[in-house]
Image (spheres, rainbow, N blue to C red):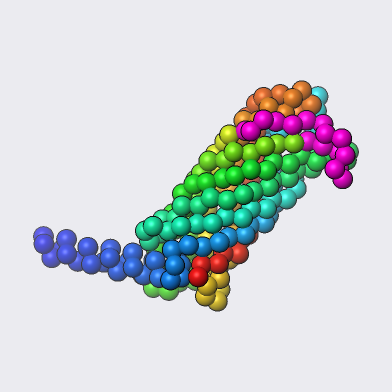
Amino acid sequence: MRKRVATAALGLALLCGAGRASAQGILPFALEARGGLTLPTSGLSSASGPDVGSAVSFNVNATYSPLPGISLYGGLGRDAFDCGDGCDLRGTGVDAGLRLSVPTLIPFPLRPWVKTGLLAHHLRGERSGGGARLSESDLALGWELGGGVTLNLLPPLTLTPGLRYRRLLPDLGPEFGGARPASYLVLDMALRLAP
């Protein structure tokens, strides 16, 4: 019994140590720039308002890894949507949360990850080109859940494609259906620098 426990503990220590070495550089910090496509799923369009469609998303995050495979992240983001007929809907704000990476014993080029976090975004609808404001929300709180893979490039760079589900409760006024839950997907790619 003791041999099994000792073998399991040694295996876990090797697994965690290898995961830390392959997941990040010497320092426990990393910077990540994400860009991608937003795909509204519900709540951003109303029967009387504009039909909201896909557009772009940009995020910049900093991460701190206190333990192998566990990272705390925080950053700034901007999610945009096309609402037709010269209308743009944009959400800007902060996000913070927890990211878990699967450690690997051997250097493998792909590592899966999942993340969950909280959002605090300010949504604004306006005419394209910075024209008249159509609607604006107070600070809308929400959450996100996502996952993807990390692809090792040349150290200290990695590519991290992912898919995130985001849900907020904005009040955009009668033009966009008032206060109701709004959700959307973000399909994106990130370049991550872990020195």
- Give the quadrant of the N terminus: bottom left
Secondary structure of the magenta portion, mostly? strand
Q: Is residue 106 magenta?
A: no
Q: Is residue 127 magenta?
A: yes
Picture quadrant where residue 143 is located: top right
Q: Is residue 9 left or right of residue 181?
A: left
Picture quadrant where residue 90 is located: top right
**Residue 89 location (% of width, % of height):** 76, 39
Q: Is residue 3 left or right of residue 119?
A: left
Q: Is residue 79 left or right of residue 145?
A: right
| Vertical position of residue 179 compared to residue 38: above or below | above
**Residue 21 location (% of width, % of height):** 40, 70
**Residue 171 location (% of width, % of height):** 68, 27
Q: Is residue 79 visible?
A: yes
Q: Is residue 152 left or right of residue 65?
A: right
- The magenta stretch is 125-140
Task: Name the residue at 88% across, 39% down.
Answer: 131
Task: Name the residue at 72% across, 28% down.
Answer: 172
Task: Name the residue at 56% across, 73% down.
Answer: 153
